[in-house]
Amino acid sequence: MEAKDIFAFYASHGPMTDPGEASALLKPLTNDAAALSRVIQGLAIYDVVARDFYGFEPPKDRLSELHLRLIAKRLARIIELDDRPLDIAREPERRVLGRCNSFALLLVTMLRAKGVPARSRCGFAAYFNPPNFEDHWVCEYWDAQQRRWRLADPQIDDVWRRRLDIRFDTLNLPRTQFLTVAEAWRRCRSGEPYERFGISFAGLRGLWFVAGSLVRDIAALNKMEMLPWDLWGAQPGPREEFDLAFFDELAALTRDPDSAFAEVRRRYEADDDLRVPPTVFNALNERHEAINVLTGSAGASASPGESLGGAAPRHEELNIRQLQQAFAPN
C-alpha cells in the first residue's frame, strides 16, 4: 500500500473522532500539534489528580464524562461547561473530565480536522512510576517536515511536568519514554519482567495485561479508539491461558503499522475477536454498553451481567472490582 493511502486514512475521521455538528468549533484552530496540545490542556482535566494538582474536587455526578467515547459528545460537553471558543483556557472546574485516552483522542481529532495524519496509540509510559511502565495512551502524528511519525502526550502540561520532574519534550516523546504496546510485548517476550507493565498500584500487570492492550491498539489503528476499561473479544484475564502465537502476530503487525497497513486492516476486519463488536463491557460501569456511532452517542446499556448481544468478552477470570479500583478516582 502506498504511503499516500495510509496518510489519507489517518488524516480522515473515523467513527469515534467524527466531530459531527461540532466541526465548526475546530475550524479556527491551528494545525500545530504543540499549540493544539495547549488548547486541550485548557479544555480537559485529568480527574484523579484534579484536586491535588489543580485544587478542584470533581463532583461525583460529573464522572460520567470519563465514559464519553465519541468525540462529538466530548466536544458538546466542553461547550456545555463553557461556550467560549476552544482556544480560550477554562478554569479547572469548567474543564471536561478525562483520562489519557481522551486527551490523546482530542489531539487526534483536531489534527485530522486539519488534514494531518494522526492516530491514538496504546502503550506504556516510563515517566509516571519508573522503573515501571504504566498503562497510557498518546497521539502519534505525521510530521511532514521531518517525514516521520512523532509521539505527543497532550496530557502533560506545566503542572504535570513540575510534579513529575519531566525534562524531555512530551510533544516529541522519546521512544524509550513511551513504548507502543508492540514494543512492550517484544521486551516481555525477550525476557524483561512482565510485572513492570500495567497499572502498578492496583496490581494489574503482567503479560496478560500487555496482550489486552494489543487488542485495543489494533482497534485504534483501525480508527476505533475505545476506553481503556472497555473489554471485548480476545483480551485475556489475569489467570487465563491464552495463545502466545496469536499475540506474537499482533505485535509483529502493529510494531510498524505502516509497513503492514493492509494486513492490519484485513486482520482486524476479518477477526471477530479483534473487531470492536456492537456492544462492549464497560468494566467501570460494570455493564455491557452499545456503541452507537451513527447517532453520535453511546447506545442503550444493560444492567450488570446482562448482555445486549454480540460476542461475550473472554475475561471471566478478570477481577472487575480490581479493575474498577485501578481506574476509579482516588
Image (cartoon, rainbow, N blue to C red):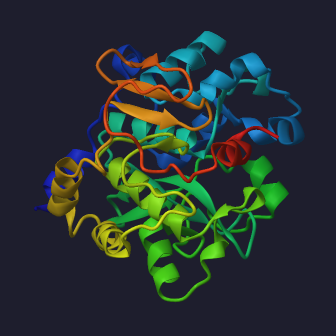
Residue at horizontal 29 percent and vertical 35 percent from the top: 14
Residue 39 locus on image (x, y percent) = 59, 35
Residue 249 locus on image (x, y percent) = 29, 72
Q: Camera-side residue: 198 or 21?
A: 198
User: Where, quadrant-wise, is the C terminus in this rendering?
Assistant: top right
User: Which quarter of the picture shows residue 11?
Assistant: top left
Q: Camera-side residue: 188 or 57?
A: 188
Residue 136 locus on image (x, y percent) = 58, 55
Whether residue 82 is visible: no
User: Among all residues in the image, which is located at the extreme bottom?
Assistant: 191
Residue 301 locus on image (x, y percent) = 47, 19
User: Where, quadrant-wise, is the N terminus in this rendering?
Assistant: bottom left
In the rendered view, does 245 fall on the left or right side of 217?
left
Q: Is residue 229 above or below residue 236?
A: above
Residue at horizontal 51 percent and vertical 49 percent from the top: 316
User: Among all residues in the image, which is located at the extreme left?
Assistant: 1
Instruction: Please tell me how many numbered marks the rendered image carries.
Output: 0
Whether residue 295 is visible: yes
Q: Camera-side residue: 176 or 296?
A: 296
Residue at horizontal 76 percent and vertical 51 percent from the top: 160
Q: Is residue 148 above or below residue 102?
A: below
User: Which quarter of the picture shows residue 297?
Assistant: top left
In the rendered view, does 305 fall on the left or right side of 256?
right
In the rendered view, does 12 fall on the left or right side of 93?
left
